[in-house]
Amino acid sequence: MGALQSLSDEPEYRELAEKTGFSFEQIGILHKRFKQLSHNEDMLRRADLNTIPDLACNPIRTQIIEAFFDKRNFHQNGDGTVEEISFEEFLVVMSHFRPPALNMTEEQREKVRREKLRFLFNMHDTDNDGTITLEEYRHVVEELLSRSGALGKETAKGIADAAMLEVASISMGHMEPDEFYEGITFEHFLKILKDIEIETKMNIRFLNMDTTTLCNRDSSSIR
Amino acid sequence: MSTMGGLSQMKLAVNFLTIGLVILSLPCGSYTEIPPKPPGSVTVLPPVKPAGGPQAFPDAENSNLPVFTMDYARIQVPFEVTLWVLLASFAKIGFHVYHKITFWVPESCLLISIGLIVGAIMHSVHEEPPAVLSYNVFFLFMLPPIVLESGYFMPTRPFFENVGTVLWFAVVGTLWNSIGIGMSLYAVCQIEAFEVQDINLQENMLFAAIISAVDPVAVLSVFEDVSVNEQLYIVVFGECLFNDAVTVVLYNMFIFVADMPVVEPVDVFLGVARFFVVGLGGMGFGVIFGFVASFTTRFTSNVREIEPLFIFMYSYLAYLVAELFSISSIMAIVTCALTMKYYVEENVSQRSCTTIRHVVKMLGTISETLIFFFLGVVTITTEHEWNWGYIMFTLLLALVWRGLGVLVLTQIINPFRTIPFNFKDQFILGYGGLRGAISFALVFTLPDSIGRKKLFLTTTICMIMFTVFIQGISIRPLIEFINVRRTNRNLETINVEIHSRLIEHTIAGVEDLCGQWSHYYWKDKFLKFNNRILRKILIRDNRAESSIVALYKKLELQNAMEILDTVSGDINAGSSIVSLQYVYPLSPSSSCSLSLSLYFALSLILLLSLSLACSPSLSLSLVLSLTLSCSLFYPLLSKGLKSS
């Protein structure tokens, strides 16, 4: 993809629109933002994302940034991480946050739900072994609580332990005393979060208006 | 457990029976009035002669020291109030003895029915019911507790996520309904066959403004038991609370204008300006009082016993001050409760927190019960004027305009929503527009200069009965039939809480990344402002605590209480907190027939005492009707219970 500056490059945009479900205007705006972040280059690096000022005070920014470089989120059945991503991959990761269409059947809704929960699962499962172990869960909880004052690691540990216990009791029922709960598989993950209605919560309303002009302070602070 | 329950029930029943018997025995003496002593006066005894004769009181007449006196007039008002409240509450207990009824028929309908029966009895003996639904009593005493309860327990997160939609429906929706119904009714009035040509446009618009407002009392009592998806629930909930601003403005405007022959454009403009004053002023007062209340609770660590008082006093004060300036008092008290809740619950002790929640719920439930009960009573006892055409057309037009309004407004606002409303949601939104007691109270206090006031009263009552009974009863089966998307509202697991927070932070982060901001951005900004400034001022012990940790602590506490409860049996503190969260299963049917008969005995006694307070003829008719109904219902119910 060369220097795509206008919407007139229909074939590339059409392909992207079909793949991700965004409209042409939305793709155009996101492309502008991509260029802003990557300083008009074709590929985006972690360093570019680390400099966004608003993101700096987000407690889980490392996980979020990692998610963009995680091959599992590119829907191409790869795994591992990459060092830089292209616009197409950026868009594919963004498409996880698209709101569901107005009239969907139950299976389509289920599919959307699985996709979004898969994104969250990948955020937890950093070593890509298909389960969320206690250590990984503890890490997430610590990050989440890192902004709320000096709680210390002990509280976070206690909470993560309680959460794992909850998952174990919901998915495995009654366990023998010497049985050990290995880790949360994706199926268990789906089960414990099935009531959370993720298809209505995990959405970003992608606007059709150009908001990149409002973001110019990011590029100026990078210098 | 069950035997213990049965025993305590027996004790309670015996206590009540003794009290009842005592009350009954009172009029066995003379039911005549003894001239009441003027309060505060000192009884001057005649001087006692020291070398006394046989009597200490050498009165001229033959009267001895009265061993037993009665002064009814002194206690009349509080006594009757208490008896009415008890009667309505007994009705509520009665419904739950056979719980299948309350599943299908909302409590509001049952209460109105009982009220109708009592009203019929009172009417037949020409007694006047207490003026509960008059303007002052209703708006100053009956309505605030309910609105406080709904504001206090409003789920804040979904509310703020949907605040745009809520305000859109509340303001524009109510305007649409009022103007639409008013105009169409005026057109209907022109039809000669209905004989209502003397109602002019202003009066029609006034009436339309009154009945187009969706009523919080009715809606909440129906929607609380029925679980629909979160967005729909919060929009219905919010709409019925926030349309008060529009109703107040329209009502005052049309009352003012009903006297004037000609409406000038400047009046319309002033009306719009007044709307902003009313709405924003209401919210402003609420926020101010909320902050003052939070600030006060910062210093109450040494007066823990009266901590809950501040909550009630400040919210009531917000309500009254708003009423003083004729701005929207419902919005004031709701915003006050919303603002207060977050900060106050961190400042007060655990016990005060529980007390506040429990008392708020209790007051709200009592008010709601009384309102529906008295709706039934006054239906029978007011004077009616029936007019087929006007009433039927009002019902029809109200339905039609509400349906149209919901359709049009949703089309306009759906593009702005993350989760648009589909047709099923819209249907429930339109169908759930119940009218209730607020409309009745407003019509009741229309000035008598409006000629057709009785017709308006009758129409309002028909409207209320229609919506509460027909729409209220049918909404549950309809929701299941058309399969509206539901939300499970009892999600208190740590995993869900952790992941909710995770999702929020993720979305905020991705939004920052791609430069597309929505309400999460504003929420984040507000939270930062909150942490930096507001919490420091308003909270005593400022340790920023994540909601995950708060939930974790709460669940741990519950677990500990549960363990205590099962190990050592009856611990009072444990049961008081735990019982708020859990619903105990119904007692087995073996004690049901016993409780049923006790219930009937108690209500009989209660009604008797109430009626004796009013008049002897009333008591006679009550005894007759009750014995008849008991003898009819008891075998039916006991048969039904045995089979269940």
Image (cartoon, coloured by chain):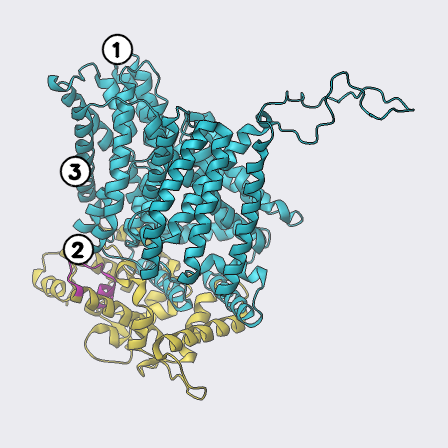
- Report in which chain the residue with disc 3 lies: B
Corner quadrant of residue B463: top left
In the picture shown, does residue B343 fall above or below B30?
Answer: below
Do discs 2 and 3 share a chain?
no
- Residue visible at 27% across and 36% down in the picture: B465
Q: Colour of chain B?
A: cyan
- Report in which chain the residue with disc 2 lies: A
Q: Is residue B523 visible?
A: yes
In the picture provided, is B39 more to the left or to the right than B79?
right
Instruction: Please give the label number shown on residue B261.
Output: 1
Is label 2 in a helix, a strand or a loop?
Answer: loop
In the picture provided, is B614 more to the left or to the right than B631?
right
Residue at the disc numbered 2 = A102
- Residue visible at 38% across and 49% down in the picture: B95
Is label 1 in a helix, a strand or a loop?
Answer: loop
Q: Residues within 10 Å of mark 2 (few under 14, many from 20)?
A: few
- Residue visible at 40% across and 50% down in the picture: B156
Image quarter where the C terminus of chain B lies is bottom left
Do discs 2 and 1 share a chain?
no
The region drawn magenta spans A91-106
Instruction: Please give the label number shown on residue B404.
Output: 3
Residue A61 inside the magenta-drawn segment = no
In the picture shown, does residue B204 fall above or below B107?
Answer: above
